[in-house]
Image: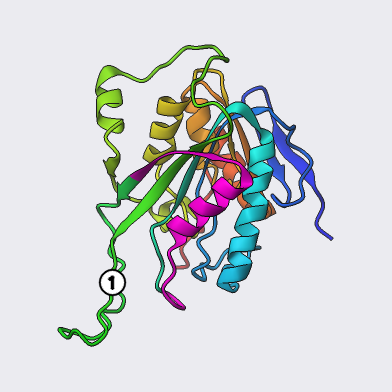
Amino acid sequence: MKSSEIYFQNEQFRLIHDDVLTTSLVDENSVDLVVTSPPYNVDIQYNSHKDDVSYTDYLEFSRKWMTQCFHWLKDEGRFCLNIPLDKNKGGQQSVGADLTTIAKQIGFQYHSTIIWNEGNISRRTAWGSWKSASAPYVIAPVELIVVLYKRNWKKTSGSKISDVSREEFMEWTNGMWVFNGESKKRIGHPAPFPVELPRRCIKLFSYVDDVVLDPFCGSGTTVLTAINNNRKGIGIDVDKKYCELARKRILGIETPKPKKKK
């Protein structure tokens, strides 16, 4: 049986090695902002997570972990959920609409949806009926960042110190974001997202010194970005190897590359 533990902790951040569905290592009403990209259920080869369950099971899993986040958030807490617009692997599903509906059923209030256009990605693996009206596939090469909140949208607590510039605010409140995705090989994780995604969410939707949580910490991008922008970070991951990857990355510890054989 997997042990639950605080894997690493200092004044700036905490890494938790535990299952997001059952962990008791995050206090209720203690988090200001959740920024996360959960597993997409598209058969990505994680170390410890099965990413090809039935769609019904995936939605139930999503309900459970989002309910946990709802409890952890303060009443003025915000929730930035990076998910696909839809999926076609194993059958077409309206993932973005379905997960947004589940979040509202849990109790989250809907604020807006940001469209993220990954400039360096192409997901065209099938065209359906080529050049025919018989059964063509229509696939939008974008992802969503659904912005939700717990009870009150207006933020009246915290440091009340915003560090978003005029230019950033003007650009980021336009709900079409265009920046590249992240390299799996460079980070050493099968599904990393780029620093730019949490950076924008953190600066736009939280104050300096707020607590930012990622329940699927992976390589630690959200926690690292929170620290670099004068917030406190909490990351949870079920896989100990990813906890160690995140720890090293956040602390700036270089992982030695294997020597090439002569």
Residue 224 versus residue 60: which sits nearer the camera? 60
Answer with the quarter of the image where residue 26 lies: top right
- Let me know if residue 210 is in the magenta part: no
Q: Position of residue 235 (x, y in %)?
A: 62, 40
Q: Residue at x 84, y 61 (%)?
A: 1
Magenta-colored span: 89-114
If the image is split into quadrants, where does the C terminus sit?
bottom left
Relative to 17, is 11 above or below? Answer: above
Answer with the quarter of the image where residue 126 lies: bottom left
Instruction: Categorize mark 1 by other alpha carbons within 10 Å: few (<14), some (14-19), many (20+).
Output: few
Amino acid type shown at disc 1: Arg
* Left or right of residue 16, residue 222 in this image: left
Q: Residue at x 38, y 54 (%)?
A: 183
* Left or right of residue 84, residue 222 in this image: right
Residue 242 versus residue 41: which sits nearer the camera? 41
Q: Residue at x 15, y 83 (%)?
A: 131
Q: Position of residue 244 (x, y in %)?
A: 64, 47
Q: Position of residue 166 (x, y in %)?
A: 27, 18
Hey, which residue is sitting farthest right in the picture?
A: 1
Q: Which residue is mark 1?
A: 124
